[in-house]
Image: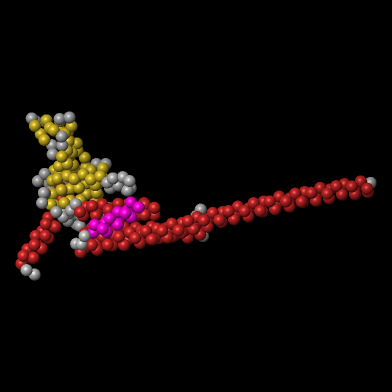
Amino acid sequence: MPPIACFVAVLWLAALLAGSAKSEDTLDEAHTLLTGSDKRTWIELRIEKFMGQGCIGGSEWTFFIDGRVRHDKCLEGHLKSTWTDWSMTDLNSLDRELRVGEDAFIVLFQDGSDGLKMRLRQQSSSKAEATVDIVLSSDE
Amino acid sequence: MNETRFKVFELAMKLATVLLTLAGILWGVWTFTQSQQQQTEMLARSSLIEFERQLWTRQIETYAQIAESVGKIVARLETGADADAAIQDFLTLYWGAMVLVEDATVESEMIAFNQELLDQRGAWSTSDRVKRRALNLLEACRTSSRAAWQRIQALAEGKAA
């Protein structure tokens, strides 16, 4: 195979792998992706802060390794924080469930060129209803 | 005295004859009605069995079509070939023939497979995950057709209405 063809093949493979779903085979690996070594903040929509407690829009989630999660949300120009618990379990060989308080999502991570992302999915059980996805970006 | 007894006896005999005739007629009507009812029920059951059997045949055919379509998609993704036409065929079945024959589990697996295809295009999934979803879907189809056949057998044996 000519060297240029090898180079193109390597580039193509690298591009393919760059945007692929993050492989987190075990639950422990998924925990580490979710919380980092201690905590990790996931941004649904970045909160723009100004003058102390003031803010504009946004919603952020910080997952702690001890099983707690803080939801920061900008409501009427003020930052509101609520705490709840999270847990993660394997539903089957393909689906992993992340519970945040009362809400359950199918969670998937992606480590692409634009950083670590987490997708929370509320899967529809009927074709007539849409599946809802929330994509959050890691604040790192 | 004897003549009076004879008249009473004669009257009783006439009455008994009338009563027996009436009872015979009623018995005949009842037997006829019962037999008609049984025949109607048997006809209804065999119609139902025939309907279920036709539906099952249609289901098997459609599941075979979906298996072929899913197989094509997986094979093409595995080799990196263009799977657009195969995905289009899958979507035609997804919104068409499958809606008529799938049960809730198969529907759920169809949704999951379709989502996995979308995820694979959006770099949230891999061809390996698509392959595993395909296997889950086809397993659900197999379970569904087996359950439908058992339902038909139960109907034929009169275990279910």
Q: Residue furthest bottom?
A: A1
Q: Residue at x 51, y 60 (%)?
A: B157
Relative depth, front residue between B14 and B96: B96
On the question of residue B138 being in view, the answer is: no
Left of A74 or right of it: where is A123? right
Q: Is residue B98 magenta?
A: no
Where residue B2 appears, x then y in whole percent? 93, 49
Relative depth, front residue between B17 and A29: B17
Residue A116 position (above or below residue B46) = above
Relative depth, front residue between B75 and B20: B75
Where residue A138 appears, x then y in whole percent? 13, 46
Q: Residue at x 24, y 63 (%)?
A: B75
Q: Residue at x 70, y 53 (%)?
A: B28
Where residue B152 appears, x then y in whole percent? 47, 58
Where residue B84 appears, x then y in whole percent? 24, 57
Q: Residue furthest front?
A: B85
Magenta residues, dominant SS class: helix
Q: Quadrant of residue A134?
A: top left
Residue B134 position (above or below residue A82) = below
Left of B142 or right of it: where is B121? left
Q: Residue at x 71, y 50 (%)?
A: B26
On the question of residue B35 being in view, the answer is: yes
Q: How is the image coloured?
A: secondary structure
Q: Is residue B88 magenta?
A: yes
Find the magenta span and give its range.
B83-96
